């Protein structure tokens, strides 16, 4: 489970979820459940 809050993390969240960036350790975890606030999810296009 990943809990992410704040706009400052929105670009990284997009990179990991939509762009499948595996550079970050959390990006290598399969079947991860994400809990995001609106600010952290603001850059996602899939929402």
Image (cartoon, rainbow, N blue to C red):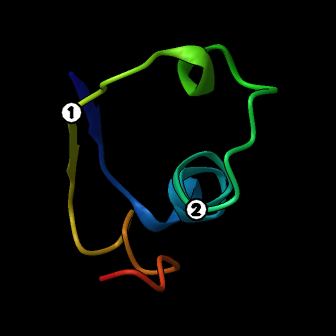
Q: Position of residue 13 (x, y in %)?
A: 53, 52
Q: Residue 47, which numbered label?
A: none
Q: Crowding at label 1, few (<14), some or many (≥20) Cα neighbours within 10 Å?
A: few
Q: Residue at x 61, y 45 (%)?
A: 16
So how many labels did they put on this image? 2
Left or right: where does residue 24 sit relative to residue 34? right
Q: Looking at the image, is mark 2 or mark 1 earlier in the sequence?
A: 2
Of 31 and 42, the residue lying toward us: 31
Q: Quadrant of residue 2?
A: top left
Rendered position, 28 above or below 20: above
Q: Position of residue 35 (x, y in %)?
A: 17, 45
Of 22 and 6, the residue lying toward us: 22
Which element is circle 2 on?
A: loop
Q: Residue at x 75, y 41 (%)?
A: 21
**The N terminus - image quarter:** top left
Alpha carbon separation for disc pair 2 and 1? 14 Å
Which residue ends up furthest to the front in the rendered image? 30
Left or right: where does residue 6 sit relative to residue 8? left
Left or right: where does residue 3 sit relative to residue 25? left
Which element is circle 1 on?
A: loop
**The C terminus - image quarter:** bottom left
Q: Position of residue 27 (x, y in %)?
A: 59, 27
Rendered position, 15 above or below 23: below
Q: Crowding at label 2, few (<14), some or many (≥20) Cα neighbours within 10 Å?
A: few
Report the residue marked by disc 2: 18
Left or right: where does residue 11 sit relative to residue 3? right
Rendered position, 11 above or below 28: below
Q: Residue at x 41, y 80 (%)?
A: 42
Report the residue marked by disc 1: 33
Q: Are marks 2 and 1 in contact (CB under 8 Å)?
A: no
Q: Position of residue 9 (x, y in %)?
A: 54, 53
Q: Residue at x 52, y 52 (%)?
A: 17
């Amino acid at each position: 489970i990943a809990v992410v809050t704040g706009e400052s993390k929105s670009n990284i969240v997009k990179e990991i979820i939509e762009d499948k960036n595996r550079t970050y350790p959390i990006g290598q975890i399969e079947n991860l459940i994400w809990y995001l606030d609106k600010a952290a999810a603001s850059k996602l296009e899939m929402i």
